[in-house]
Image (cartoon, grey):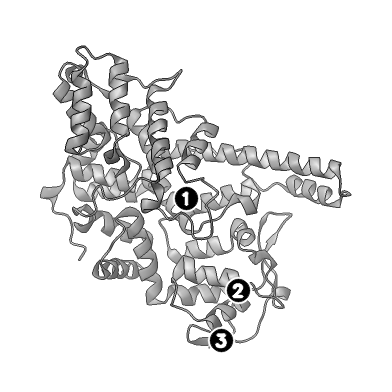
């Protein structure tokens, strides 16, 4: 298992697959540039992203703001009534504007970052540690959590887990900020094990209650908008957890969890599902978990081995995933070489397609896979493809996508469109429809070619990656 892909099999198609999965899709020149590298160098381009300079701005509101907390306290002191309600709505409108700005900035960053894997990992962790602004309600806390994923996403599992477990957004999302020795928050302890680290069936109800006791005292300091441990709220008593007994703290619980063999199996299996395919044999997951353990719980060696493996480029993996709404939109913008739509329009697009960034549907995140495709969302994808390509006031620049040689030869044009948008051949039926469309136009105008691109993006083939 995890046999390295032979250099003789490294080509345009495998490079395109790596771009699609470790990033959001590559343009032909990017894929060609990657294909000219060795497999090791190509994988290193994605995995060693911290070596690549990036100058990404942060919102001016993405800082601790004591004034914001003071305003909240003043509103809470007001008598119930219209004045108080108006102040609350005013603050909520401000938070909503910040969230919208944050979505727009993140989508643009996904599309244009020189570090594609960093943003792809950030998206994975957002789904894994699914936290919603609907309950958190403060844009700064959501921005801080996403930034944590971005900073620590390819580092040590234990470090990321602690950072997220004590993250203000998570403390609010799962009500851990109210946990105290008199009333331990078992829901938080359960989700840490069931959804984040071990999976169902690998702990007992007693483990849940003992972990909850150990995690009491984890709190949120509102004035500084940061995590704070409050010793007087912590249960200092002896606990027995996953077969071990001691005077455990919450951090001790995390240590015990990540030391379980199942912890490595669980998280590597989820990473393979996200980057590889829905199905993975037990042997493959075991091999991935072994790499993870040998790397002392670091994600970078795991990702390097995964992207370098022959299994990652297997026939059952390539073009086997349904694009998530975010993958669909960001990838489309990249391949069309057009700007990302304005934040409100971009966020609305992916929300209609089933993925409302910063607002996952529940603690389990998005189901993904076939759940992305319904009659309604498929029609929305086709309509959104028309919007992106035809663009109203801003149609795509055909000269950036199609060469003069391709314009003069319809067979070459069809092959060129497939190479750019699919890195594969269309199914015979869809290819026939697109070929017939092109043949009906003797001299292809820019608009004719745009319609051809729209037709290609409205095929079942384009929904796969």
- Estimate how packed mark 2 is, as few (under 14), some (14 to 19) or many (20 or more) residues with alpha carbons within 10 Å: many
Residue 186: image tag: 2
Q: Extreme right residue here?
A: 79
Crowd around label 1: few <14 · some 14–19 · many ≥20 (10 Å): some
Nearer-N-terminus badge (1/3): 1
Mark before the other along the chain sequence, 3 or 2: 2
Q: Nearer the viewer, mark 2 or mark 1?
A: 2
Helix, strand or loop for disc 1: helix
Figure quadrant of the N terminus: bottom left
Give the number of the disc on residue 150.
1
Residue 443 is left or right of residue 136, and the answer is: left
Front one among 395 and 430? 430
Q: What residue is disc 3 on?
A: 246
Q: Position of residue 311 (x, y in %)?
A: 21, 58
Q: Could you tell me how far apart the alpha carbons at marks 1 and 3 are, in whole angstroms?
A: 34 Å
State how far apart marks 3 and 2 are (Cα): 19 Å
Residue furthest out toward the top: 443
In the foreground, 322 or 212: 322
Determine which quarter of the picture holds residue 100.
top right
Between the residue at mark 2 and the residue at mark 1, the CA separation in whole angstroms equals: 28 Å
Q: Residue at x 57, y 37 (%)?
A: 101
């Amino acid at each position: 298992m995890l046999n390295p892909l032979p250099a003789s099999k490294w080509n345009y198609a495998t490079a395109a697959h790596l771009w699609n999965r470790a990033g959001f899709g590559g343009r032909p020149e990017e894929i060609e540039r990657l294909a000219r590298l060795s497999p090791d160098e190509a994988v290193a381009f994605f995995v060693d992203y911290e070596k690549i300079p990036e100058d990404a701005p942060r919102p001016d509101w993405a800082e601790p703001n004591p004034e914001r907390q003071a305003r909240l306290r003043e509103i809470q002191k007001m008598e119930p009534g219209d004045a108080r309600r108006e102040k609350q709505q005013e603050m909520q409108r401000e938070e909503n504007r910040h969230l919208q700005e944050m979505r727009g900035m993140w989508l643009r960053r996904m599309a244009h970052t020189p570090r594609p894997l960093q943003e792809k990992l950030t998206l994975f962790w957002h789904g894994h540690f699914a936290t919603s602004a609907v309950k958190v309600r403060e844009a700064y806390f959501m921005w801080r959590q996403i930034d944590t994923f971005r900073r620590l996403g390819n580092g040590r599992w234990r470090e990321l887990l602690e950072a997220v477990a004590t993250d203000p957004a998570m403390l609010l999302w799962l009500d851990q900020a109210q946990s105290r020795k008199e009333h331990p928050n078992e829901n938080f302890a359960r989700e840490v094990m069931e959804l984040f680290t071990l999976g169902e069936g690998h702990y007992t109800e007693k483990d849940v209650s003992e972990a909850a006791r150990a995690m009491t005292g984890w709190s949120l300091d509102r004035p500084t908008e940061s995590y704070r441990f409050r010793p007087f709220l912590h249960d200092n008593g002896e606990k027995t957890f996953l077969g071990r007994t001691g005077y455990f703290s919450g951090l001790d619980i995390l240590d015990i969890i990540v030391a379980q063999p199942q912890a490595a199996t669980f998280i590597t299996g989820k990473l393979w599902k996200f980057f590889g395919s829905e199905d993975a044999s037990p042997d493959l997951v075991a091999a991935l978990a072994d790499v993870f353990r040998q790397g002392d719980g670091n994600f970078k060696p795991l990702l390097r081995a995964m992207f370098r493996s022959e299994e990652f480029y297997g026939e059952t993996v390539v073009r086997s995933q349904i694009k998530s709404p975010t993958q669909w939109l960001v990838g489309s913008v990249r391949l069309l070489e057009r700007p990302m739509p304005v934040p409100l329009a971009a966020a609305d697009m992916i929300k209609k397609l089933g993925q409302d960034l910063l607002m996952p549907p529940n603690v389990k995140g998005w189901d993904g896979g076939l759940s992305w495709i319904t009659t309604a969302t498929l029609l929305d994808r086709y309509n959104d493809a028309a919007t992106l390509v035809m663009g109203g006031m801003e149609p795509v620049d055909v000269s950036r996508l199609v060469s003069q040689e391709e314009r003069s030869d319809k067979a070459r044009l069809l092959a060129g469109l497939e190479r750019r948008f699919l890195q594969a051949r269309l199914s015979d039926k869809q290819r026939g429809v697109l070929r017939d469309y092109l043949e009906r136009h003797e001299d292809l105008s820019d608009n004719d070619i745009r319609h051809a691109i729209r037709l290609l993006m409205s095929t079942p083939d384009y929904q796969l990656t």
